[in-house]
Image (cartoon, rainbow, N blue to C red):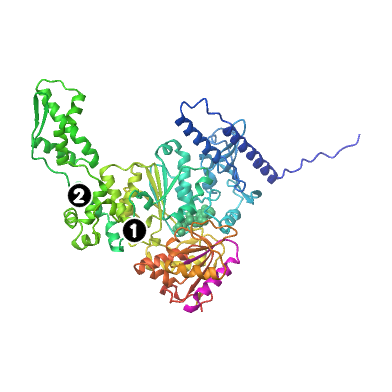
Amino acid sequence: MPTHAPVQEPTPDPLRRERDHLSSSRSALRAMRHDVEALDISDVTGNWVNAKVLAAQIDDRIKALADLADTPLFFGRLDYQHAPGGELAEGAAGESFYIGRRHVHDAQGDPMVIDWRAPVSQPFYRASRTEPMDVALRRRFGYTGGELTAYEDEHLSDPTETATSSRLLQTEIERPRVGPMRDIVATIQPEQDEIVRAGITGTVCVQGAPGTGKTAVGLHRVAYLLYAHRDRLARTGTLVIGPNASFLRYIEQVLPALGELQVKQATVDDLVAHVPVRGADSAEAAGIKGDARMAEVLRRAVRSGITMPTEPVVVVRGSRRWRVPAYELREIVEELAAREIRYGAAHEALPQRIAHAVLVQMERAGEAPDDRVQDAVARNSAVKAAVRACWPQVDPAKVVLRLLSDPEFLASCADGVLDAEEQKRVLWAKPARGLASARWSAADAVLVDEANDLVRRTSSLGHVVLDEAQDLSPMQYRAVGRRCSTGSATILGDLAQGTTPWATGSWAQALEHLGKAGARVEELTRGFRVPREVIAYASRLLPSIAPDLAPATSVRESAGALSVRAADPAGLDDAVVAACVDALGFEGSVGLIAADARVPALGEALAAAGLPWLSPGEETSAQARLTLVPASLAKGLEYDYVVLDDPAAIVAGEPDPRTGLRRLYVCLTRAVSGLAVLHSSELPDALGSFGGGPTR
Ligand SMILES: Nc1ncnc2c1ncn2[C@@H]1O[C@H](COP(=O)(O)OP(=O)(O)OP(=O)(O)O)[C@@H](O)[C@H]1O
């Protein structure tokens, strides 16, 4: 008999094994979706309302289970040394978990992919060589066009393996940007993960330099909280607040990509949009109207109609007359006024209190009145007349209208709070006759919102994320704060990017106005967007705009292309257009950022040169990559290449030099790969001398 060489088991190709797992996970996800689509709800829904609600939930679930072809189902794998929780059990076998955007299980219910938010996934983001968290292997996967093409291993518990930086992470960070903001779920960094997974009960405030991932962290935090506290937040709701509509459009796809479709988005102006804004304020007037002292002025205004009774109330029932003397009425009114209840709630409580006083007399007289009698007395015309006289109903908008139109009323409410000059500034130049003709400004709308809340409590959401928080006025912080008064908040911002005259100078103050004093403040300093040379150039402005803040570092390896070029005024537009053409020669998006006043001229110059362009908020694509961005809308956005038109014009577009330089700092920090600055006016001092490029 011939002897055979022993059969060699071929070494399994690990990439093939992983690809096989990917394709079985895809099939499992499809099966999960089919199961949901096949659900017959006709038997379980008692009425059409229930049926509608259930159908909508099922629809959401189907959408959430959609397998997006170019979104990998998993991006990581963790091999535990022991079964989770079984570290102490002798011989406990390790388990392997694939980490992805959503949970996928097979027909038997066994997990194929674990949601990145599950506790078992946490070491993917946090485990380190010093603290391996029982992880034997952490594997990161790399994809090209939806295909699994690479992986990278770390054996965290192996003392012989030396730490290296992750190429896949670096590739993800350096990737050219096109289209709307994407999630960072595969590459959340440990310091970011700490914020993302912070408990729901506490408010977290994040100070972070441009590009440190504040927006990304805030959005992932909502997704995490929705996972960890789904029932509670489904009842109470979540809201993401951003600076303007184009920013909200830029970020709106991040949460749906993570399977979360129910998170509302709004600007601060949207919160108070129950008041139609048709007017505008000077910066000074807006500053005073946004000052926290206005809260006291409004409180006094809303309560200005409370009058101490001087007459008794006489209630006639049948043949009997019941008399509540004036001193007793005064006690009731004083007690209600001293209590921390809303004006409207007190207005509703007062007739019952008076009726109660009548009932006490009835009982003393030997009668046995019940609740129905009390209700009838409360509705008695004498009681109603007394309530009208001493605690009249208040229309919040009318009170604010009177405050802004009637100097005497304002003076009486602002006495000792606003000085005469401030009162003059707050008053409308043209007093309004009535609500229909009122030309409310954005700051007025916030005042009406506060007055509303004084009359009737604003309902609170479970969690609110406030992005670009540094720009809010104290009164705006209060408007946000009352929308999370019984919930928690994530406050994100950068003091150096404050571009309103009332931008906050300290997070402690902002948190106080939000009603979240004492919340913890975290700082992020590792920048993922702006390349080294560009952030160094922009950071030259820090000593004059935010001297206490340290410049951001950059985790990007490429130093970035930075050029600063002078042009004569007549040739500036052409030079800018040429710079755009150069930038379009590279991969990725291009943003031409200019002072708002320069936008029309530059728009024409681009059109004359045959360059089509988009406005912020319009989605960039491989075909349409150039966006013309007014400086006032640049905040929060990013472009691969930025062409910055005339910095001095951007500074001059703001009411004061500090705000101008801050606006410029925002514009200088939008670039991912390169920044070209073109100027015909002199540059601000700090940016004047530039040795790193061709300054002519
Ligand atoms: N961990 C990460 N992995 C990969 N990319 C990241 C990471 N963190 C942030 N980024 C990317 O860095 C860029 C900047 O992030 P983001 O816009 O959240 O920063 P920001 O702090 O809000 O900036 P700004 O202050 O300018 O608004 C985004 O493209 C984001 O996707």
What residue is shown with label 2? 300
**In the rendered view, would you say 283 is above or below 92?**
below
**Under tag 2, what secondary structure?**
helix
Total labels: the figure holds 2
Give the amino acid type for the residue marked by disc 1 in the picture.
Answer: Thr
Location of residue 200 by image quarter: top left
> Is residue 692 visible in the rendered structure shown here?
no
Q: Is residue 539 magenta?
A: no
- Among all residues in the image, which is located at the extreme right? 1
- Expressed as whole percent of the image width and height from the top left, the position of residue 309 reads 11, 40
Does mark 2 have its CB less than 8 Å from ligand 1?
A: no
* Residue named by callout 1: 504
Magenta extent: 568-593
- Mark 1 vs mark 2, foreground winner is 2
Q: Residues within 10 Å of mark 2 (few under 14, many from 20)?
A: some
| Label 1 or label 2, whichever comes before in sequence order | 2
Q: Is mark 1 within 8 Å of ligand 1?
A: no
Q: Of residues 609 and 269, which is closer to you in this image?
A: 609
Amino acid residing under circle 2: Arg
- In this picture, is 537 found above or below 67? below
Q: Where does the image place residue 89, in percent across and percent down from the top left?
A: 55, 32
Q: Is mark 1 on a helix, strand or loop?
A: loop
Q: From the image, which quarter does the N terminus lie in?
A: top right
Q: Nearer the viewer, residue 307 or 551?
A: 307
Q: How would you classify the magenta stretch by its main secondary structure?
A: helix
Residue 71 visible, this angle: yes
Query: In the image shown, does 85 or 68 lie closer to the viewer?
Result: 68
State the residue at coordinates (74%, 43%).
Answer: 11
